[in-house]
Amino acid sequence: AIPRYARSPIIMLTAMSQKPYIDKAFAVGATDYVTKPFDFLELRGRLTAAGKMVEESQRLLESAEKTKRQMLEAEEEIKPHPDEPVSIDGVERVVGYTALENYLFTLSRTKLMFASTFALAINEFRALHSATSAREMRAILKLIARAAIDDTPNSGNLVSYRGNGVFLCVNQKKSATSISQRIAQVNAALSEYAAVTPAKGEVRVSVGQEIS
């Protein structure tokens, strides 16, 4: 990948309307998916939205560069605001919030919605955010995202971090792992993490009501 385009939005324009193609596209980084025949007014709207994503990505990049300069000046790492939907890189099937919205819209528009959504929330997140360093906070978020992904082959499940300790998860009907099992996986991973890191208090997640 070319680093300067790492966060550029990717719109898939294709005749492939089957769900496995849609799932795979978003899982590997697509931010939107449009199938033939194209409605040119809709396509224009999607391109406009992609342009806004580029502007927002540039704003976040400039903010990150400013933070980096502040870190160098202060010789310490500065944490993002707790409400910020920080990017979680390096975890398969963890996508941006806009990409997740577009994925669900695509499934509903093509009548392929065979999934439900639910939210995971880190308990006492504000207190945890205050008690941890920026590096520790990112490690916890990445650990939760990785543990929340169902490792069933070709499950198609996706996870997105919304900020304020909240993860939105798409659970496919064919998933072999139940939501309660996925919560147990996350909390077990957090317990293992706590065993090898300085104590910051018990970190646990709770689950909201599943919506089909």
Image (cartoon, helix red, strand yellow):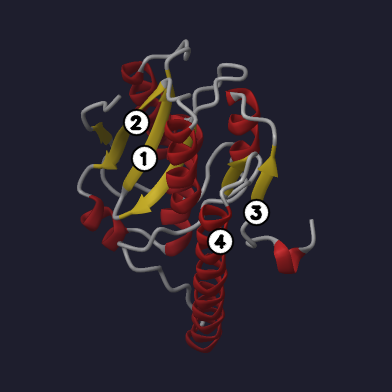
Quadrant of the frame with the N terminus: bottom right
Q: Earlier in the sequence, mark 2 or mark 3?
A: 3
Q: CB atoms at circles 2 and 1 under 8 Å apart?
A: yes
User: Residue at label 2?
Assistant: 117
CA–CA distance between discs 2 and 1? 7 Å
User: Which residue is painted at 39% across and 26% down in the image?
Assistant: 188
Q: How crowded is the residue under tag 2: few (<14 C-alpha within 10 Å), some, or many (20+)? A: some
**In the rendered structure, which disc, 3 or 1, sits on the residue that comes first in sequence?**
3
Tell which of 87 and 209 is nearer to you. 209
Q: Residue furthest right?
A: 2
Quarter of the image where one finds residue 186: top left
Instruction: Estimate the x, y position of residue 129 in percent, counting from the top left.
Output: 30, 58
Q: Which residue, given by chain and number where applicable, does mark 4 sit on? A: 44
Q: Nearer the viewer, residue 142 or 33?
A: 33
From the viewer's perspective, is the residue at label 3 or at label 4 nearer?
4
Q: Is residue 131 above or below residue 173?
A: below
Give amino acid for label 4. Answer: Arg
Left-right relation of 43 to 182: right
- Dot 2 lies on which element? strand
3 vs 1, front mark = 3
Amino acid type for the residue under numbered disc 3: Ile
Q: Is residue 65 visible?
A: yes
Viewer-proximal residue among 10 and 7: 10
Q: Is residue 140 left or right of residue 183?
A: right
Q: Which residue is mark 3?
A: 10
Point out the tag, 2 or 1, that comes first from the N-terminus: 2
Please name which of the two marks, 2 or 4, marks the residue nearer to the observer.
4
Q: Which residue is mark 1?
A: 168
